[in-house]
Image (spheres, coloured by chain):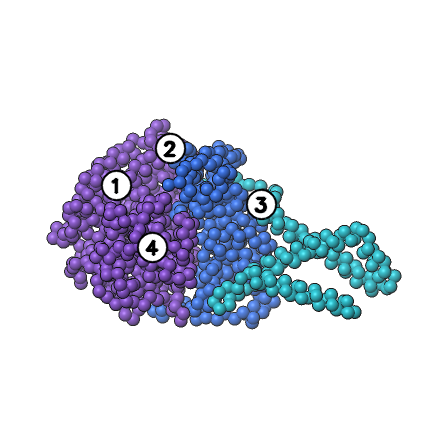
Amino acid sequence: MADTRTIEIEVLRYNPERDTEPHFQTFQVPFSDDTSVLQGLQYIKDHLDGSLTFRWSCRMAICGSCGKMVNGVPELSCHKFLRDYYPGKVRIEPLSHFPVLRDLVIDQTDVFDRKLPAVKPYVIPETPKPLAAGTYVQTPQQFHKYYQYSQCINCLLCYAACPQYGLKPDFIGPAALALMHRYNADSRDRGWEERAEVLNAEEGVWGCTLVGYCSEVCPKHVDPAHAINQNKVNSTMDYFGVRKLLMPKGGD
Amino acid sequence: MAQIRTYVRPMNGWWRRNPYFVRYMIREGSSVFLAIYSVILLVGLLRLSQGQAAWEAWRAALTSPWSILFHWLALLTVSYHAYTWWKVSPKTAPDLRVGGRPVPEVLIAAGGWLATIGASVLIYVIVRWM
Amino acid sequence: MQTVQADVVVVGGGGAGLRAAIAVAESDPRIRVALVSKVVPMRSHTVAAEGGAAGAIREDDGLDLHFDDTVGGGDWLCDQDVVEYFVAHCTEEMTQLEHWGCPWSRKDDGHVNVRFFGGMKVQRTWFAADKTGFHMLHTLFQASLKYPSIKRYDEFFCADLVVEDGRVHGVVAIEIASGEFVSFECKAVIVCTGGAGRAFGQNTNAGIVTGDGMGMAYQHGVPLRDMEFVQYHPTALPGSGVLITEGCRGEGGILTNKDGYRYLQDYGLGPPDPSPRPKAMELGPRDRLSQAFWHEEQKGRTASTPLGSAVWLDLRHLGAAKIHERLPLITEVAKTFVGVDPVVAPIPVRPAVHYTMGGILCNARTETPLKGLYAAGECSSVGIHGANRLGSNSLAEIVVFGKVAGEQAAQYVKAAPASRTDAARKQAEAAQTRLLGLLGRDKGERFATVRDEMHQAMETGVGIYRKAASMQAACAKLAALRDRYRRGLKLDDRNRAFNTEWLSAIELGFTLEIAEVIAHSAFNRRESRGAHTWLDEFTERDDENYLKHTLAYRTGDGPPRLEYAPVTITKSPPKARVYGGEGKYVELT
């Protein structure tokens, strides 16, 4: 068992009932080789200050709850380890570009209540297929056209990475646009027209200036920058009325 | 439902906080040099249409020390611009797969560079030959 | 207090909750559905399920085979009429998910692929790489956005049911962001709050799996059934308890002890070859595999790692291509948490608590004894898992019975009389007063102290192998912990807005009661069946005395009152539960 060392963790604190502004607070946290940043926060909450508030759930980088800014970089705190920051200190803040609700907790309603539903993220088939007809046939080739974009865990690190979202909160944003592409690219879907208005809008793909940091920080390698920017081509073709001509939808 | 007093963090100085953003701003800034250079070339075209004297005057202006300095800076920044342009070009391309595997982005970017270098060599040869 | 009017309230936004809400919406879009979840739905623990969901589709498969595997897997404690319904509806639900966009892994010809899972005779586990729960949950969540009649209340913590005249009238919830109480007034409540694995220290579960719904139903007189049956998943990472899917073994992975020996052959699951072979060796059921680990550990044949003793899950012979295509999540997880690349090295694994077979008593229509209250998913005991659940039956369960619950609730609210809003309001006020009381204590213990002692008691007393003395000790310890909890925890956090320490304290109240139910139910089942195994006495299954369900009823501050109920046997009289043995080598797809 690795011996225990101590690391300094600085966290942003904000209490909407008392504070007008956030401030930092520092804690000394013992850790071993396998202690994650999240576990460091849990240690503080369990033993030092039970009022430190943060979201977490699965501890295995699949639920998307635990996103934080760690030394200025958007990370999932459950799969970053204190040993990699030691002996420097670890500064933990809520994800950038979102309003702070409490301590490390952000107000995420803009993405979940507005942006995600706006892209109509569900299969819109040509005609509804009865269950008795069985499953669609989808070849590996068709599958790979969209599968990567279906890996998004909605962790919001890409929004924290996107300065356009920070500067213009109306921007639909990386994850939502990637999810839109995921459905547009799925051979079972024929919903392009229904999603076109949102995609083609200023707040849609055209709000992106290809900073590209979203794809850098995405823990699931969804590559939202690719999803958005390849759709600038589609959007342009749509504008000139030649999209369907040049990109017929194959599939079942 | 209930209204909470959330805190919105200001965006000023956002690009200074992360080296990735600094590089992005330099990339975007390089297009200023590209734009100025394009204007200089356009002015050159205009002078060409205005006759021998105007053209010679424009050529002479290009040899001034400030002009030389600008053109060296422009060469540097526009090259950087081209490098970053090709680097992100795979993001604008559709998903490319060969033999069931995604084509590595570095190959797509390399393709762009090959085209750039090829075109540059071709233009140089033509100009020299003329 | 704010009130919300709805017809059906679904508590919990995981696979079962979302499926139930969709079923209500599809049955009649005029029915108002409130989907109330303490986390945003994509964070629900369904997201972490990895291996797959069962549904018979192969030519050489059939409903009777799925039925037999499930009933045998459950060591004949399953209600067979419910199992018959269940197996008959799995495939159609998997197809429904596919229509909604679920990216099931395919064969080269574009048809859905199925793989082997523990305890199954034929391949019937539909899978989406090794992130099946993730893909199912996101598909369901995204599909739910199509239905305007489903109104979501994300990050609202349901803390109590409102019950009057033997009927449910609503739920009392806390809006987490503000700490304000909201009374949801409705005619039907569908509880889909998941299991209670967090009663134990070492578990594969997320922090949110604290048994809230089970606790709420239990506190209102609904019995919890078969709680002694807690599943230890045989392959979790040492230390964190992070899950390494059974799908690894479904793809041909093997388990070896520190000497590189495939030890499962010593525990009635052999012979080791030909390999792989259904229902044998690494494809045996979870309870048997976890028990085998325990024995190996006692014999000193497990490997010693910095995070605890473990055995090795070896995937190297699968090859990099297959591992990266079929098992990408566990590859990432193994590298991140234990620094192992499964392509070149075996993964250290050990059992950890994973699933609660027991839960809120309900019938095949998901109706609980409390009128208007329905239960679906892991929080329920609908009767299909018996004493041990087969892998991939749970992801199938949530959609099969989520749909049933939604349809039943929709029918019920059409005929049910209006709910008693005056009574509801009074009860909601009372709940608010009680729960706010937790916030104001000046002295008491830290939440973490009581929680850690509960974990310790459960791990020692109600583990893989159980002894009379240790179970009794656990019962006593839990009674003492409940007492200490009642006397009060002192919270550092006195805020109303987003007070997760307060919510953890409320959750602990539920988990402690459930832990006590588990310990008492276990102590009183004097036989070994499925996941409930005694160490030194009552080591055999006793159908004469114990072919029955345990029902635990709350008695206030004291221990639960236990009753027993018969098991419904239809087609399959109890037989010996046999795995391993001779068999043909199977080509894995």
Distance from Cα at disc 4 to Cα at disc 1: 25 Å
Which of label 1 and label 3 is nearer to you? 1
- The subunit carrying tag 1 is C
Secondary structure, mark 3, is loop
Say which residue label 4 marks.
C313
Give the residue at x 33% y 66%: C588
Distance from Cα at disc 1 to Cα at disc 3: 49 Å
- What color does chain C have in the rendering? purple
Say which residue label 2 marks.
C491
Label of residue C129 in the image: none
Which of label 4 and label 2 is nearer to you? 4
Q: Are marks 1 and 2 on the same chain?
A: yes
Q: Residue A131: image x %, image y %?
A: 35, 67
Asked where in the image residue C459 lies, by quadrant, the reply is: top left
Give the residue at x 51% y 46%: A74
- In front of the other: C260 or B2: C260
Q: Residue C187: image x %, image y %?
A: 31, 49
